[in-house]
Image (tube, coloured by chain):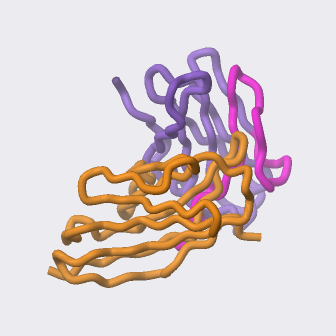
């Protein structure tokens, strides 16, 4: 069983650019959630994808968008980057319809916006 | 508005002591309460979790105490070890979304 993986590990962008982050869910999981974790803070829910559709969204603007693919992997896209977008972006996978409630996190992508 | 309030922000405990971290919530629709442990440069790892119909859950040295009427829950780490030094987050699930506390940085002194 493989865990949640994310790429890239680190990324540096400048204000106004666009970025794509990638996540492979844990084997057997069908749902991916994305979180933003600012330094010294808890993770903040961005959105969740299930069956390739957005399945819930937190308080983030539309320039944060995502995709889920048939193999349940996912992308997070952020347009028009702002300095405040600098954070650790976490992906978590889980199984909707399964017996448990757990979500498992990947190691994250550290995004720095200059 | 912070949906889950966590305290203390930081905690220093002697090896072998008990570490206690507290969380409070307002939304009675929350139906699952996990605790996560996070080491620097890593993603959060699930430590232990509880449902609101249970008042206590113990797994090894880790215990969650849950008070539904007070809308509070806490993590107790017994016999704390230097390897437990990490940041701990409580969370609560409402619908599809997990709401996290702001974290507690735990340092266990040898």
Residue positioned most to the left? B110
Residue at image point 54% right, 32% down: A94
Quadrant of the rendered structure where residue A56 is? top right
Instruction: Work out whether residue B26 can be spotted.
Output: yes
The total of numbered circles placed on residues is 0
Residue A51 within the segment the image draws in magenta: yes
User: Which chain is tinted purple?
Assistant: A
The boundaries of the magenta stretch are A36-65
Which residue shows up at 39% across the image and 33% down it?
Answer: A3
Q: Position of residue B22 (x, y in %)?
A: 50, 72
B12 left or right, relative to B83: right
Q: Is residue A18 visible?
A: no
Residue at left offset 44%, top offset 53% = B44
User: A109 or A34, which is in the foreground?
Assistant: A34
x and y, in percent, of residue B27 in the image: 74, 59
Above or below — where is A87 with respect to A27?
below
B80 vs B65: above or below: below
Q: Image check: A19 left or right of B62?
A: right
Give the camera-side residue of A68 and A15: A68
Quadrant occupied by the C terminus of chain A: bottom right
The relative height of residue A29 versus residue B53 in the rendered view (above or below) is: above
Residue sitting at 21 percent across and 83 percent down?
B14
Q: Is residue B19 above or below residue A4?
A: below
Horizontal and vertical percent position of residue A76: 66, 40
Chain drawn orange in the picture:
B
Q: Quadrant of residue A52?
A: top right
Expressed as whole percent of the image width and height from the top left, the position of residue A24 reads 50, 30
């Amino acid at each position: 069983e493989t865990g949640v993986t994310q790429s890239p590990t680190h990324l540096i962008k400048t204000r106004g650019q666009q970025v794509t982050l990638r996540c492979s869910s844990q084997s057997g999981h069908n749902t991916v959630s994305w979180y933003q974790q600012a330094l010294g803070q808890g993770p903040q829910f961005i959105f969740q994808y299930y069956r390739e559709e957005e399945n819930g969204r937190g308080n983030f603007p539309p320039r944060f968008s995502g995709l889920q693919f048939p193999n349940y992997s996912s992308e997070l896209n952020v347009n028009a980057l702002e300095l405040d977008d600098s954070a650790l972006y976490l992906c978590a996978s889980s199984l909707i319809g399964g017996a448990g409630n757990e979500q498992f996190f990947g190691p994250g992508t550290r995004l720095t916006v200059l | 508005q912070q949906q889950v309030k966590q305290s203390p922000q930081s905690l220093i405990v002697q090896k072998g002591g008990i570490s206690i971290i507290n969380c409070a919530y307002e939304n009675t629709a929350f139906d699952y309460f996990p605790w996560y442990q996070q080491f620097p440069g890593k993603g959060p790892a699930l430590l232990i979790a509880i449902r609101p119909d249970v008042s206590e859950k113990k797994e090894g040295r880790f215990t969650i105490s849950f008070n539904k009427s007070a809308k509070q829950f806490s993590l107790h780490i017994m016999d704390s070890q230097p390897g437990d030094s990490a940041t701990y987050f409580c969370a609560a699930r409402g619908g599809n979304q997990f709401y996290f506390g702001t974290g507690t940085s735990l340092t266990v002194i040898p």
